[in-house]
Image: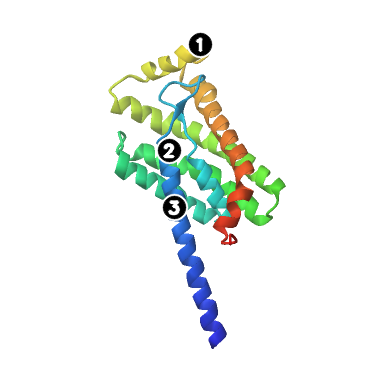
């Protein structure tokens, strides 16, 4: 009976630590989301941030479900503190696209926790995220932005043409701006995660004394 109580107590401590870490990592991700950088090959309204970094680190440390929850905390904080110009649809897209990277990466890494699997997971996650972002932008976000800001779709395409003359329609906009943007973001976040995870992992696993 005493061993059962001890096990239950240990599980409770683990659960509290996990919930706390999800909240903290989600808050850090939100803060990083507020710091944005434009990229030379995409229109100005696409800006790079490093908010997926703590999400991916948390995913590797605690699993894909926890990663999705960290992503959710990040997006909810952004929505309620920063606000939304798309009635929450853009924030939903951010959550969905982010999960398309961290969840597959976390699932692959969880199956066999090696550096090789981590790299494979991040590469697969980056590809899935980029493909999902392309589809979501083409059929949901770009039409929504055009409607929200009362501008024709052609005006958005023109913004892409200014940075890359090869962008002439929605298809080339997605293939030459949206997809490369997300591939670049995924690659940068993956490299940073690879460099930082081993240093942060002991803290998340409670092995720091």
Whether residue 57 appears in this view of the structure is yes
Of the two numbered discs 3 and 1 in the rendering, the one whose residue sits closer to the viewer: 3
Q: Residues within 10 Å of mark 2 (few under 14, many from 20)?
A: some
Distance of label 3 from label 2 (alpha carbons): 14 Å
Q: Residues within 10 Å of mark 3 (few under 14, many from 20)?
A: some
What residue sits right under mark 2 in the picture? 33
Up/down of 99 relative to 139, above or below:
below
| Colour logic | rainbow
Question: Mark 3 or mark 2: which comes first in sequence?
Answer: 3
Residue most extreme to the front: 209
Distance of label 3 from label 1 (alpha carbons): 43 Å
Under tag 3, what secondary structure?
A: helix
What residue sits right under mark 1 in the picture? 165
The residue shown at (35%, 46%) is 77
Identify the image quadrant of the N terminus.
bottom right
The residue shown at (46%, 55%) is 22
């Amino acid at each position: 009976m005493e061993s059962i109580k001890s096990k239950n107590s240990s599980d409770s401590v683990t659960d509290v630590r996990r919930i706390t870490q999800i909240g903290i990592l989600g808050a850090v991700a939100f803060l990083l989301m507020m710091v944005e950088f434009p990229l030379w090959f995409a229109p100005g309204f696409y800006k790079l941030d490093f908010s997926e970094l703590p999400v991916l680190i948390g995913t590797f440390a605690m699993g894909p479900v926890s990663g999705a929850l960290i992503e959710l905390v990040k997006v909810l904080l952004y929505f309620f503190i920063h606000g939304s110009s798309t009635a929450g649809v853009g924030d939903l897209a951010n959550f969905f696209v982010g999960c398309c990277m961290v969840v597959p990466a976390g699932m692959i890494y969880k199956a066999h926790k090696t550096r090789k699997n981590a790299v494979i997971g991040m590469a697969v996650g980056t590809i899935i995220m980029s493909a999902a972002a392309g589809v979501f932008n083409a059929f949901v976000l770009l039409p929504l932005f055009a409607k929200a800001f009362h501008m024709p779709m052609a005006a958005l395409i023109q913004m892409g043409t200014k940075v890359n003359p090869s962008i002439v329609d929605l298809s080339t906009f997605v293939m030459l701006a949206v997809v490369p943007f997300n591939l670049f973001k995924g690659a940068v976040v993956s490299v940073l995660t690879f460099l930082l995870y081993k240093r942060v992992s002991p803290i998340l696993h409670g092995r720091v004394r």
